[in-house]
Amino acid sequence: MYVTPEQIQAASKANVEAFLAVANSQFSALEKLANIQASAMKSAFEDSIANTRALLGAKDLQEFVSLQNSFAQPTIEKALAYSKSVYEVATGANAELSKVAERRVAEWNENFVSLLDKVSKNAPAGSDVAVAAVKSMLAAANSAYDNFTKVAKQATEIAEANVAAATETARGLAKTKKAA
């Protein structure tokens, strides 16, 4: 039993493909974050100019204070939208990385089982117990990995629900302050 150059080449190609998939995913996430940031900065700049012009046009102190108070709600809404957008990009990038990792683990498991089967065919008599033990350990490791993945997905869902609840609470508080 030996490793052929074709097997080495296939493994190298799979590793490079996995690396490129991760790099592409990360670049896409960074590009989205840059666009979100640029949009937020542009909006903040435009809002500050409009707010300054409105404040300069105030006729008295009461109108000035009223204008300042009216700027708070849109600012809070935009901050919440910005936070939500960043969170969505981060969650999407994490999901992409998880998919790549899951594919690599599945490929590794498949290759390992195939190698184990080849080795067991050429193994001396009586080694069936050792091969069965290794296969059992691999099955247990796969089960643990699957459970870990499920727990991580549940944690992500809980975090998303918490972010949504916090966003709604912040909006409610902002509306309450505006009404008061």
Image (spheres, rainbow, N blue to C red):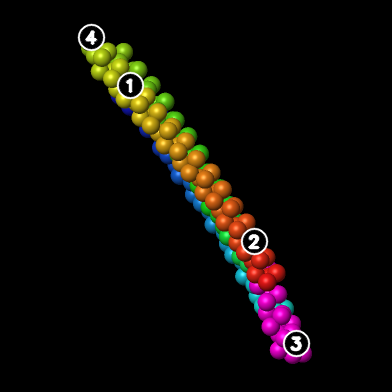
Residue 85 image position (x, y, % from top left): 60, 56
In 3D space, how far apart are the residues under numbered discs 3 and 1 (Cα atoms)?
Answer: 77 Å
Q: Tell me which numbered mark, 3 or 1, is placed earlier along the sequence.
A: 3
Taking the spot 58% from the left edge, 60% from the top edge, the residue there is 83
In 3D space, how far apart are the residues under numbered discs 2 and 4 (Cα atoms)?
Answer: 73 Å
Toward which corner of the image does residue 179 lie, by quadrant?
A: bottom right
> Would residue 40 appear left or right of 91 to someone viewing this image?
right
Q: Tell me which numbered mark, 3 or 2, is placed earlier along the sequence.
A: 3
Taking the spot 54% from the left edge, 57% from the top edge, the residue there is 30
Taking the spot 64% from the left edge, 61% from the top edge, the residue there is 172
Q: Which residue was labeled with disc 3?
A: 58
Residue 164 image position (x, y, % from top left): 59, 52
- Tag 2's secondary structure? helix
Amino acid type, label 4: Ala
Residue 118 image position (x, y, % from top left): 34, 17
> From the viewer's perspective, is residue 109 above or below residue 166?
above
Q: Which residue was labeled with disc 2?
A: 172
In 3D space, how far apart are the residues under numbered discs 1 and 4 (Cα atoms)?
Answer: 19 Å
- Tag 4's secondary structure? loop
Amino acid type, label 3: Ala
Q: Tell me which numbered mark, 4 or 3, is placed earlier along the sequence.
A: 3
Closer to the camera: disc 3 or disc 1? 3
- Tag 3's secondary structure? loop
Residue stretch in magenta:
52-74
Amino acid type, label 2: Gly
